[in-house]
Each structure stands twice: as structure tokens, then as C-alpha cells.
Image (tube, rainbow, N blue to C red):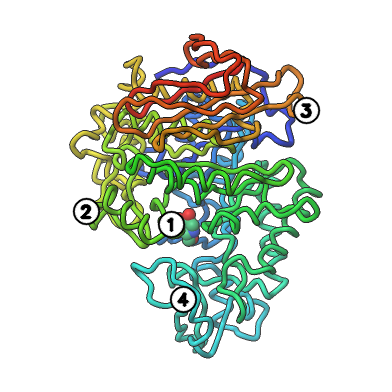
Amino acid sequence: MSFTVPMGQPGLQHDPQWYRRAIFYEVMVRSFADSDGDGVGDFQGLISKLDYLEWLGVDALWLPPFYASPLLDGGYDVQDYRSVLPEYGTLDDFRELVTQAHQRNMRIVIDLVVNHTSDQHEWFEKSRTDPHGPYGDYYVWSDTDDLWTDIRIIFNDTEDSNWAFDAERRQFYFHRFFSHQPDLNYGNPAVHDEIFDVARFWLDLGVDGFRLDAVPYLYESDEGLGESEPETHDFIASLRAMIDKEYPGKVLIAEANQQPQEVAEYFGSEEAPECHMAFHFPVMPRLFYALRSQLVAPLIETLNETKDVPGAASWAVFLRNHDELTLEMVTDEERQALYGWYAYDPRMRINDGIRRRLATLLDNSRHEMELAYALLMALPGSPFLYYGDEIGMGDNIWLQDRDASRTPMQWTPDRNAGFSTADPGKLYLPVIQSLGYHYSSINVETALAQSRSFLHFVRQLLHVRRSHPVLGVGGYDTCLTDNQSVLAFVRTLGADQCRPGETPETVLCVFSFAHHPTTVTVSIPESVRGKHLRDIFGGSVFPDISGKNTVTLTLGTQGFYWLAVE
Ligand code: NOJ
């Protein structure tokens, strides 16, 4: 497979707000490509696929943890923040990845696991064996497990308490996730210094930013519920201040799975900025809800609630990632409905969520996949793709935990889907062979050979979005419609937001969640009146709307339009 990309400017282009126009791609090193045939993906494998990612139109990679780890939580159980897992390669390989990505003007964002470490981290070893030593206070210890019993348990399928007893220290330690992941004690300033230094270590190696893992849970208090405590925000603001001062242009992305207003707080304020981006957890499940209920009201409500973000902050919008499709923050009715539609087999469920990939969730419906991606690319914020979803990869619910959707990337119809030359039994996880998703038909090579494949569709979407910066940085306004299954909004880029070479632009986006063809009358805002509409993809000019304050459109099943207002 060879990928030709137009010659651009070599190297990273200077742009402190690069993340606002970027398309991100989440890729686990372990899962993408194995260069040395040991059955596990590695940095060299990922480097060999950068041409593919550039061809696809990706501007930044997000790499989940690749640090030394016992891998009991996909690497989010960090044993040493400064070394890479030997199976993935060496620090020099990582440096080469950064250099090679930067040569393509592609950024690298990595995970900073701030809330906890593995119980095999040497800080924890020292903390439990030497309570009065320098690491004695690095974790949250207590003589009793009766403290903060109102704090919810996140991994409620596996854990029945947020406390675990350590037989060596003869005390309980606090953990918000697995019991092998003790929470760091942010009440101890030494922990702040350690995390700052870890951040500096990777920034010195050239990374472009961090996803702050599990960031709401840093502090606990008697008054709060251990989520989004004021001190947690103070810590993030201080981390941001350090980064702005010492490493300007690097970004922080909040993984805060909270209610809309609470997530938005992770942007901080003009005076005390926190994260540049925050994952848009509230909108994601509502999108899946709309796909099946054919009702867009909850989606509109959430989008309106999260419209205003301070300064240069930006939402990170996504459909799927390496975790379950989390339903922690939806109403009980919504959760039950979503389980009924998307997780009818109990094996599909985990904790408060669904462990399936995009294509399987959507029953491989091309209409739905296109609609979901088109909406993702048009929503305010920057889209995050999950590796493999661009070819409609399947999952394996017979695997444990969230490994269901972390299987090897499918490149070719050959052995191990072209991911590795290892004996198939040696792969870190088996490749997908289920009905309808077998790697012999779902793979990059086959998708490339079919000009109407989903992969080509996704690529076109990415490239069209790239040439319309309004979709990245423009304002957002919902339009009223007379159809409860249709979402319509305008995105507007004013002259003050344009960079040299860009022009002000307005786009009317219309998405039908109806399961049959439908008609909609959209009220158009003043800014759009008296103009013409032109389809961005094919260039067709739509009936004249000058002099009208509504436009009536017909949409095919789960169809959509991106219409330039001219
Ligand atoms: C959030 C990560 O996305 C998830 O994979 C992990 O299990 C938890 N943090 C705990 O580290």
C-alpha cells in the first residue's frame, strides 16, 4: 500500500491554537502495527503507518499510555512515568516518532495519568514499606475505610469499595479505579512537583500536549464527592500556568466525564485558564440516543448548554474511544433505552457503559455511520477519531473488559490482518473474525481498492472539513425546525476569526435522524437570509432562499447537508 500526499511545508507550522483546527486520531501503540513480529504493536510499526495517517487527513495523534506498566488497565496503571514498555520500543524510537510526525506537520499528544499509579510503582512500594520516609505521604492512607463512603465507585463491575487494605502498612489506601491503582495524594505538594517534572520530561522530548487522565478525581474532601473539588481546579490552573510559561503552544485536554456545566469548568476562566480542550462527554451519548429514538431534542439541549467556551478553548468531540461508551452521565431512562438498543447482550455491557465499536453499535449501517461522522465533523470543537473506526472495524465481546474494542488494526486480508508476522496465537489479542467484520473483508487494503468505501468517505469528509475552517473555529447556533428528527445549525466564521488566506464563511448544517426520507422546514437566522445555499461536497446550488426566512429541504434516510451560505 502506498499513500501519496500533496507536498506541503515540511515540519511543524507555528500555530499556538493548532488544536482548534486539528483532527485528532487516537491510536494505541500496542494495537496499530507490529514491526518486529513479536505479536505486539510498537513505535516503529506506528512510524511505518504515518503516511497512511497523513493521507487520511489526521493532524494529531493521541497515544494512550505506553509507559512501563503491568498492563492490568491497558497501561493506565503506570509503573514508571519516564520509561516506555520494552515491547513498544525504546525512548529513541519514541523520539523518532515525534520527529517523523512533526516532519509531516502532525502533532503528538500523550496521556498524563495524574490521578493514580500502579501499585507496582516504586513510589507506592516505598510508601507502603516506609510510612515515615519521603514517599510515606504520596498516597491517600487511612486507618479506616469508613471515610468518604458517598464517593461513587466507577469500576462498579469489579470493585465494591474505593478503599483497599495494605497488609504491609496495615492501613487502607484510596483508589477511584482498580484496587491495583492507588490514588496519588494531591494534598502533598511533593506530588505536584513530581507530576510537573513528569510533564516537563515529555515536553522536553517534544510532545505537543497531554490528555489529563481521570482529572476530576485528584482531591477528596469531607464536604464534596471527590469529583471536581475546588483544589483540583487550582492544581490544573497551576499546571497550565507552568506550561504556558515554560512550553507555550502545548495543550492540555481534560478527560472529565461529568455533567455539561461541570465539564465546561475544566476550561477554567480567562484569569485562571485550565485545559485548552475537554472531551465532550455530554453530547456523545445523546448522539447515539438520537440515532435510535429519531428525536433530536436532547442533543439540541446539550449543544445549547455547552455553546459558550472561554477564549481559545475548544471541545474535543468523539464517538468512540478505547473505553466503554460511557452512560454514567445520562438519565436513568436514557440509559435503559440505550442499553436496549445497543447492548441487548449482557456481554456488551461493562460498568455503566457499552464496550462496542462504532460499526457494531450501528449494526454496520452505512447510513448511520456516515451521519454520525458527518455530525462529528461539523460539531463545534475538534473531532477525535478512534483507530479502526474509519474502516468500520468490528469488536470481540468475548474478550475481557474493554479489550473488546482494542484488537489489532486490520491492514490487509493476509495473516493477522497484516498487523504482525507473528504466529497468530502469539498476538496480544486476536484479530476480528466475526461474521460481517472478518479481517479478510474489513481492512485498509480492501477499503482502498473500493472507491465508495467508508474509508474513502471518511477521508473526503476530513479533507472537506480541513478546507472549511469555519467547522473548526466558527460560532454555533441552533436553528428551529418543524421536524423533531432533524438537527439544523449554522456555523459562522467572522472576519475577526480568519487567519491570513481565510475568508469569512457561514455553513448551514442539517442532519436527519429519521429512519425514512423526510422533509423539514428550517428557520434561518438573519445572517443567512437573502443568500444562496450551495452543497459543499458536490457544489450543487440549492433553490434560491432570498427574501425568505425559512428553507424547506428534503432529506433521504439519515441524510445530511453541509450547505455553504453565499
Ligand atoms: C481513564 C482511561 O480512559 C481508562 O481507560 C482507565 O481505565 C481509567 N482512566 C483509569 O485509569
Q: Quadrant of the C terminus?
A: top right
Measure the alpha-carbon separation of dots 2 and 1: 20 Å
Q: Estimate the x, y position of residue 328 in percent, counting from the top left.
A: 43, 60
Horizontal side, residue 212 vs residue 409: left or right: right
Disc 2 crowd, CA 10 A, few/some/many (<14, 14-19, 20+): few
Horizontal side, residue 239 vs residue 75: left or right: right
Measure the alpha-carbon separation of dots 1 and 4: 23 Å
Q: Residue at x 68, y 29 (%)?
A: 12
Is the distance from the Cβ of mark 1 to the nearest ligand 1 atom less than 8 Å?
A: no
- Residue type, numbered disc 3: Asp
The disc at residue 162 is: 4
Looking at the image, which is closer to me, 441 or 495?
495
Q: Estimate the x, y position of residue 419 in percent, counting from the top left.
A: 35, 35
Which numbered disc, 3 or 4, marks the residue closer to the eye? 3
Q: Of helix, strand and loop, which one carries label 2? A: loop
Q: Of helix, strand and loop, which one carries label 1? A: loop
Q: Earlier in the sequence, mark 3 or mark 2?
A: 2
Looking at the image, which is closer to me, 232 or 498?
498
Q: Which residue is mark 3?
A: 496
Q: Which residue is mark 1?
A: 330
Residue 97 in view, yes or no: no
Q: Which residue is mark 2?
A: 345
Looking at the image, which is closer to me, 223 or 109?
223
Residue 53 in view, yes or no: yes
